[in-house]
Image (tube, helix red, strand yellow):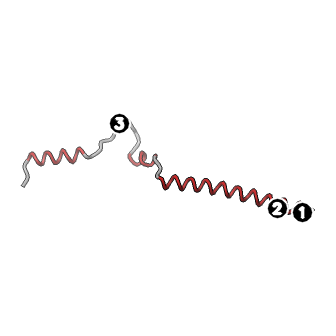
Amino acid sequence: MTTPEYIEWWVRRINDNIPEPSHVSSQSIEEHLRAVPSELEIIKQDFERRNAELEKQIEQMEEEKINLRLDTDV
């Protein structure tokens, strides 16, 4: 059995734990959390950037290889 004071305290306690929307920031919670990339996302982006650089280097080396073959054929 609970007293009315306890029920009032409990309701206040629960409501105190609910974050109220901030009028200072217009971002939603999801947008705010998305703005800070996780460590895994940072590593993934770094990997993709490095992979793209290496693919470009491979393409350049293959072009050089073809040009060298043409030079030797002449």
Of mark 1 and mark 3, the one earlier in the sequence is 3
Q: Position of residue 45 (x, y in %)?
A: 55, 53
Q: CA distance from mark 2 to mark 3?
A: 62 Å
Q: Position of residue 63 (x, y in %)?
A: 79, 58
Residue found at x 18% / y 44%: 12
In screen coordinates, is 51 left or right of 43?
right
| Amino acid under disc 1 | Thr
Residue that label 1 marks: 72
Secondary structure state at the residue bearing disc 1:
helix
Secondary structure state at the residue bearing disc 2:
helix
Of 69 and 12, the residue lying toward us: 69
Residue found at x 41% / y 42%: 27
Residue that label 3 marks: 23
Q: Position of residue 32 (x, y in %)?
A: 42, 45
| Amino acid under disc 2 | Ile
In screen coordinates, is 46 left or right of 10?
right
Residue found at x 80% / y 58%: 64
Q: Quadrant of the N terminus?
A: bottom left
Residue that label 2 marks: 66
Query: Which callout, 1 or 2, points to the residue nearer the camera?
Result: 1
For this orientation, the residue located farthest to the right is 74
Query: Which callout, 1 or 3, points to the residue nearer the camera?
Result: 1
Sort mark 1 into few (<14), some (14-19) or many (20+) by Cα contacts within 10 Å: few
| Amino acid under disc 3 | His
